Image (cartoon, grey):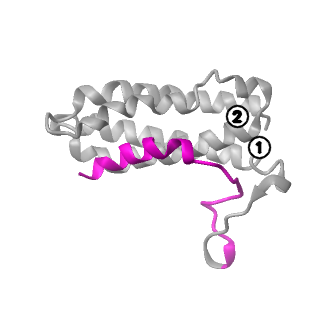
Amino acid sequence: MTLEELRLNYGLFYSQLLEFVSGLNNRLMPDAPQQLQYVTILPDILPEDDPDFQSGNEDSVIGRAYILEKMTLLVLARTRQFVDEGSHGWYDDQAEKLKIWLELVKLHSKHSVLLSNAESSKSLEAGIGGLGTRIGTRRQINVDNLLDLQNLLIACRE
């Protein structure tokens, strides 16, 4: 699979993410942490029309897709408790769709782009004997620039 094909699959996840973040703020309880309003910046980590897809900058696309995956999963794990009870059905439906799209994007990218340049990749092995199927080879990335965003989202635990 090419980077362009990955972009097309990513576009489906991205559309679902936009739907989720645009609807979340209206469904939060009044006492939810104020920082949750910034969840709307998640799609900005890797826009669907990002120039790096066209230029073929695999390192940038893969690094930011990985960060977006982790941040999205963190939000899903921590924010339901702050959603109005009447919106739990909406939230659960959105969360399930996002998780499915994330898995599909990971499945497609893991077997093509992520493994395409083993020289600059770092292997993360998991499971008994390193045969785990949930973690494959991923490029090493620098997340220093996203530390503030991570701290913001971790505030969901409050």
The residue lying at 65 percent from left, 47 percent from top is: 107
Indicate the quadrant containing the N terminus: top left, top right, bottom left or bottom right. Answer: top right
Q: Residue at x 69, y 37 (%)?
A: 60
Q: Quadrant of residue 97?
A: top left
Q: Which residue is at the front of the view, 53 or 19?
A: 53
Horizontal arrangement in the rendering, residue 72 relative to residue 37 (left or right): right
- Residue 78's place in the image compared with 95, above or below, is below
Q: Could you tell me residue 20's position as x and y percent?
A: 38, 30
Closer to the camera in the image, 122 or 80 = 122
Residue at label 1? 113
Which corner quadrant of the image does residue 136 belong to?
bottom right
Three-letter code for the amino acid on which mark 2 is drawn: Leu
- Residue drawn at x 24%, y 25% is 26
**82 relative to 151 in the view: left or right:** left
In terms of depth relative to the viewer, which is nearer, 77 or 120? 120
Task: Answer few, some or many: residues within 10 Å of disc 1's Cα (few below 14, many 20 plus, some between 14 and 19).
Answer: some
SS under mark 2: helix
The answer to which of marks 1 and 2 sits earlier in the sequence is 2
Contact between labelled residues 2 and 1, with CB atoms less than 8 Å apart: yes
Return the residue found at the far bottom: 129
Q: Which residue is labeled 2 in the image?
A: 6
Membership of 15 in magenta stretch = no
The amino acid beneath tag 1 is Val
The image shows residue 50 at horizontal and vertical percentages of 65, 24
Does residue 108 appear left or right of residue 102 in this picture? Answer: right
Image location (x, y in percent) of residue 145: 55, 42
Which region shows up in magenta? 129-158
Mark 2: give few (<14), some (14-19) or many (20+) Cα within 10 Å: some
> Mark 1 to mark 2: distance in Å?
8 Å
